[in-house]
Image (cartoon, helix red, strand yellow):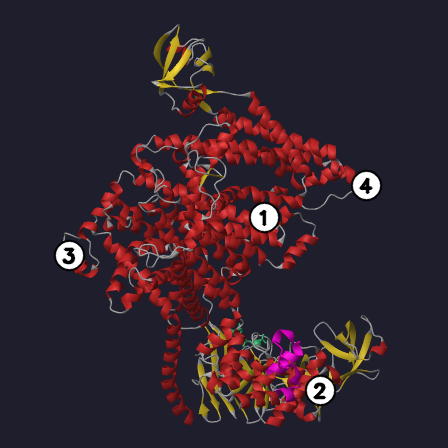
Amino acid sequence: MASAASSASAIARSRSQAMRARLTAYGFLAPAGFLVLVFFFIPMLLILFLSITNLATTNFTTDVWRMATSRDPKYIVGLDNFERMFADEFAPKILFNTLFYVLATLLLFNVGLGLVIALLTAHVDRRAGFLFRALWILPRITSPAVYILMWKRIVAASPFGILNQFNELLGRPEANYFQGEAWVFIVMLNGFIGASFGMIIFTSAIESIPKDLMNASLVDGSTIMQRVRYVILPLLRWPLLFVTTYQTLSLLTSFEYILLFNSGGPASQTEVWSLAAYNRALNTYFANAQWGYGSAFAVVLVIIGVVMATVYMRVFRFNELVAEPKIEVL
Amino acid sequence: MKIVLENLTKKFGTVVGVDDISLTIEDGEFVAFLGPSGCGKTTTLLMIAGIYRPTAGIIRFDDRVINQVPPRDRNIGMVFQSYALYPHMTVFGNIAYPLKLKKVPKEEQAERVREVAAKMGIANLLDRRPAQLSGGQQQRVALGRALVKQPDVLLFDEPLSNLDARLRLSMRGEIRHLQKELGITAVYVTHDQVEAMTMADRIAVMNLGKLQAFDTPDDLYDRPKTLFIAGFVGNPPMNFLEVEVQREGDTFYAVNSALRVPVPAERGEAAARHGGQVIMGIRPEDITISETGTVRGEVFVVEPLGRDDLLDVHLDAANRLSVLADPAVHLRAGDTVTLALDTRKVQFFDPQTELSLLWR
Amino acid sequence: MATFTSSAPTQRPLTSQEYRYRQAETGELVGQAIFTALVVVLFFELGVVLFKVLGPLIQSSPRFWGSDLKVDETLTRALANALTLLAPFAAYVTCGARLRELAAFDRRRAVRVALAATIIVYVLVTMGQYVFQVGPFAEKPSLEMSFRQTDEGVLVTGVVPGGTADRAGIKAGDLIVAIGRAPTTADELKEKIALAKFESKIGLRVSRDGQEELMPVEVVPVMEIGLAPLVGGLILALILAVIALFWPGGLTPYVLMVVIMIPLLVGYLWLIVATFSYRTEGLLPVDASGNFGGFTLRNWEFLTRPGTSSYPSIWRITLNTLVIASLMAIIVLTVSSMAGYALSRMNFPGRRAFLSLTLILHGFPAVTLLIAIFFILRNIGKVPVLGDYFGFNTRGGIALVMVAFEMPLGVWLMKGFFDNIPWDMERSALIDGASRWRTFWEILLPQIRPGILALGTFAFISGWGAYLIPQTYSVGTRTATLAVYITQLTGDTAPVNWNEVAAVGLYQMIPVFIIFIFAQEYLLNIYAGGTKGTS
Ligand SMILES: Nc1ncnc2c1ncn2[C@@H]1O[C@H](COP(=O)(O)OP(=O)(O)OP(=O)(O)O)[C@@H](O)[C@H]1O
Ligand SMILES: [Mg+2]
C-alpha cells in the first residue's frame, strides 16, 4: 500500500526532524551550559583537587594539569589539609561564629526586617513607599569600602565616632564598640544590606496579591492588622520560604563586609567560615597565600551548599515545575 | 486540499487524548469536530496543524504524508479561541506577520493586508493594538491573519465561544460564506451542536478520544448510528425507553410497563428481528399532549424555555419522557397528561452494543 | 506593627445594647493582656535564657568549642533592655484594635484597661528580668564605696561595711589620688570600674593623713537596684501606652519606618556632610583647629583631576564600570532568556536534568568557587587571542564570572516569565510560519518586557556595584570598577583622604540610585513571573 511506503520514508524523515528540534533546543541552552561548565562544574572539581594539594605562594603554578598528572608529593598531600583544618584551634570558634552570624542576620534582618519594611511600605502612600524602598536599597548599591567607612565612623572612638559623640552629649563614658559590640555591628551592617532583597521580593509578592482579595477583606471591615495576619501572610508563604533558603546560602558565603570591617577581628573574634577560606587562600595581605589549605575550607562550604541547594529543590517541589511543553515540534 | 487521517492516535503519557481516528476530509469541505469538553478535538486539530506530533497514525494533505512537516511548511491558517493576537503589534502588523515571514515584498504585503481587512470590515482599525479592540473585532483580525496567506487549510478552535449570542450568529454566516467563496478546506472545532449543524458539510462527533460518527448533519439527526449520537445530537435530547417490540399481525408495537404504541413496520421489523428487547428513542418534538393520546403520565417538573415549556413527565417508576408543551396551557407539576407519540421517526438500539438497529 | 489600625473613630452615640456588649469585653481584654504579655515575655526571656544558661554550658566544654569562647554579655544586656521598652507595645498589641474601638466611645475605660495591661506586662517583664538578673537587675562591677570629686582629689564618702573596699582597708574620708601611678578623677575612676572585669583588682593610691598608700581593691559584682530607673521606666511605659491608644493609625507606618531607618539616615547624613568638609567629628564638620566649619569642595576635585598611570581619571573608571555593568546586564539577559525559553517551552532529552541543575545552582553559593575560578581565568588567559579578552585581569573575564554568578537566578526568573505566556500565542506564530528562533525573538520576548526590565535592572545594579569579583580577579587599576577604585584609594601607603573616598562613594551611588527610583516599578515585577511558578 502507498501508505506503508510513505510511512517508512516518514520515519526516516522523523529522525532528522527530531534531531533538528533537539539541536535548536541545545542551541538555546548552549551559552548557559557553557557558563555552567566553565564556572561551576570545572571549578567544583578543581576545588576538590586543590584541597588535596599544598599549593601556596612559595610553590605556585597555574598549570593544574601538570600538577595533577605529575603525582609529585611536592604538591599532592592527600588529606593533610583537612586534618590540619580540623585540628586548627580556631576552627570550632569559626564554625560557631558562622552559625551565629547566619542565624542572627537572617532572622532579624534578611527575613524579619525585609518583611517589616515590605509591610510598612505597602501601607503608606504609594510615593512614600517608593522613596522608602529606594532609601533601603542604598546599602546594597553603596561601594562596600564606603559603606564600611560609614559604619566605622559610626562606631569609631572620639572624636570621630558618631555614637561616641552621642555618648559624650549624654554624659556616658566612651565605648570601644570594635571590641565589645563587634558582632552587633557586623550583624547590623550586613542585615541592612540583606533586608533589601527580602523587601523587593515581599513587596512584589504583596503587590501581586489580587486586588479582589484585598477589597473583599476591606469590605469585611478588617483592620490592617487582620489583613496582614489573614490575607497577606498566608499568601507570602512561598516568598518567605524562598527568601529564607536563598538568603541562608548567600549569608553563608558572604564575607566581604566583615573582611573590610575588621577582617574577622582580633584572634578570629568575628571570623566566619567563608572569610577563613578567603583569608587563607586569596588574601595577599597574609603574604603567603595557601591555596591548598584555603580550598579545604572552601570544600566544606561547597558541600554545605550542595546539600542545602538540594533541600531547596525539595522545598520548591521540583516535580511541579516540569510540566511538559505544549508544543512538540521545531 | 484533501485531509486524510489514518489511525491517528495521541497519548500524553498514560492519558489518551485521541484514540485511533480515521477519516477523510474532502477538498473544499467544511467539517466540524463536535464533542463534549476534553474529548480530544483540540488535540486532533493541533496535530493537523503540526504543533503536536502524533503518537501513531498518519496525516496526509492530498497524498503527501505531512507527519514530520513543520507547521510553517503546511500552509495552514488557524483561528484560536483566545484569538492569540500579538499584543505588541498593531492590527496591520498582526495581519501582515505571516506575509513578512514569507518574505513577501513590502508593497504587496500592504496591499494584501488592506484587501483582507476590507473583506473583514476592519479597514479602519489597522493602526490600533489588539488591546484597543472589542472581542468581535479581535475575532475578525484573527480571521484576517489566518486568511491573508491564502492557506490551503483553515483550522478553527472554538472561535466564536467568547462572543455574545447575536454576534456569534452573524459570524457563523460570515465564516461559512467566506469558506465557500474561497473554497478552502476547513476544520472547525466546537462543542456547540447548533453551530456544527448549521455550518458544517459534515460533522465528526467525538467522545473520549474516539470518533463516534462522521456524517452530514441531517443523517446525524435523523439516522443516528449509535445511542451516544442519538443522545448527543439534538436539544432537548432524545428520550430513551426500554421496550419490547412485538408483532401482532402486520403491526409492530413497542411495549413496556407504561405504554403500548404502534411503530412503523420496517423499523419495527428491524427491532423485532433482533429479539425484541431494545432501546427505543423518540425526540421530544415528536410527542404531543393531546386528549387522544394513549400514554398517561404525571408532570414532575416544568422548565420554561420561552417558546415552549419543557416537561419532565413520569409514566411510571421506570419510564420518563421529556415533552415540549405550549406555555399557554399552563401545566404545572402534579398535573396528569395524556401523550400522543408520533413514532414515524422512532429509533431502535441494541441495549448491549448501543448500535442502531435501523441503519446498517 | 500593632499600631496599624486605621479606621477613624466613629463618633455616633451608642445604643444601650452595643454598650452592654462592650462592657462584657473588659474582662476579656485584660485576660488577653495577660496572655499576650506572657507569650511576649516568654519569647524574649527565652532568648536571655539561651545566653545565660547555654553560654556557660558552652564555655565549660572547651574541648569541643575551643578554649576562649566568650558569650557576648552585651547582647544579653541589649536584649534585656529591649524588654523593658517593649512593655507598652506588648500592652498595645494585647488589646490592639478592640481597645482603640473602645477608646472611640469610652475613653476613660479604654485608658484604664490600657494602663492595667501595661502595668501587668511591666510587672511580668520586671519579674523575668529579676529572675535572670538582667536589665536593671544586672550585676555590675563595683568597689562597694561611694566617692566624689573634690579639689584635692577623689574623696571617699562612704564604704559598705564588710564590702570589698572595707576589706581592702579603705575608710570614708580617704582621698584617692591615683590608680596605680596615674592620677585620676572621679569620672575616670567610675569609667574604670564600669569596664573592669569581676575579680580583677584595681590598685588605688590612697592618701590618708598625708600618707600615701597603694591599696588593691577587688572588683565584685553587685546588683544595684535603682528605684529611679524602674519607676521611670514604668511611667514612660504608661505614657507610651496612652499615646499609642490615641495615636492616629495612618501615621504609624511612617514613624516606624523612620525609626527603623535611623542608623541608615545617620550614616548617609554623615557621608554627605563628610564630602563637603575638611574633617568631621561625629556628624559635625570641623576645620583644622577642631571648630565647627571647614566646608570645602576639594573632596570633589577628583572629578576634574587628570589621570595618571597609577590613578586613571575618574571618567575612565566610570566608563569601565559602565561597560562592565552594561555588558553584564546584556549578557545575563541574553543567556538567561535563551535558556529560560528552552527550559520553559521546548522538549528535549536532558530537559529535566538541566532544569534541576538550574534550580540547584540558583541556590548554590557561587562565591565558594572563587579560589577555583582564579585558576580557570589564569588558564583561559593562556589561550591565544581569547585569553586577551576573557582571561585573568581582563574586563571580559570579570564580566563573564559575574554573569555566571548571576545567571542561575536569571534563568529561573526568565523561565517563570515564559511559563506565563499563553501557548496559543506561540502556536499561532509557528503556524504563521515562524521558526522557534523568530518566535522567541519577535513574539515571546516582547511579551516578557517586565521580566527583562526587572532582571536587567537587577543585573546592572549588581554589576555597577561589583566589588568582590573585580577586586579578586584584577590587579592594578586597568580594569578597576568604581568600587575597586575606591578600595584602592583607601589601601595605599600615602595618608588616605577619607572625605574624598566618601565623595567618590557618593558619586558612584548616585546614578544607580536614580536608576533604581525609576526602575523600581519594573523591579517589583520580579515576583510576577519569578518565584510564583512554584506556589
Ligand atoms: N499537553 C497535554 N498534556 C497532557 N494531557 C493533555 C494535553 N493536552 C490535552 N490533554 C488531555 O487530552 C484530552 C483531550 O484534550 P483536548 O484539549 O483535545 O480536549 P478538547 O476536546 O479540545 O476539550 P475542550 O472542549 O475543553 O477544549 C484531555 O483529557 C486533556 O486532559
Ligand atoms: Mg479544546
> Label 1 near label 4: C-beta < 8 Å?
no
Type of amino acid under label 2: Tyr
Alpha-carbon neighbours of circle 1 within 10 Å: few (<14), some, or many (≥20)?
A: many
Q: Nearer the viewer, mark 3 or mark 2?
A: 3
Contact, mark 1 vs mark 3 (Cβ under 8 Å): no
Chain on which label 3 sits = A
**Hey, what amino acid is under mark 1?**
Leu
Q: Quadrant of residue C9?
A: top right
Q: Amino acid at mark 3?
A: Arg
Q: Which mark is residue A71?
A: 3
Predominant SS along the magenta part: helix
Task: Mark 1 and ligand 1: say if the CB distance to the nearest ligand atom is below 8 Å.
Answer: no
Name the chain letter of the residue that bears numbered label 4.
C
Q: Chain of mark 1?
A: A
* Magenta residue span: B116-142
* Front: mark 1 or 3: 1
Give the residue drawn at x 61%, y 45%.
Answer: C253
**The CB of the residue at mark 3 lies under 8 Å from ligand 1:** no
Residue A104 visible? The answer is: no
In this rendered view, identify the residue nearer to me: A22 or B105: B105
Instruction: Name the one closer to the observer, C129 or C401.
Output: C401
Question: Which residue type does callout 4 highlight?
Answer: Thr
* Residue tagged 2: B253
Between C441 and C294, which is closer to the camera in this rendering? C294
The chain letter for the residue carrying disc 2 is B
Nearest-to-viewer mark from 1 and 2: 1
User: Above or below — where is B65 with respect to A107?
Assistant: below
Query: Along the polypeptide, which appears first: circle 1 or circle 3?
Result: 3
Query: Which residue position is annotated with label 4?
Result: C15
Do the residues marked 4 and 1 share a common chain? Answer: no
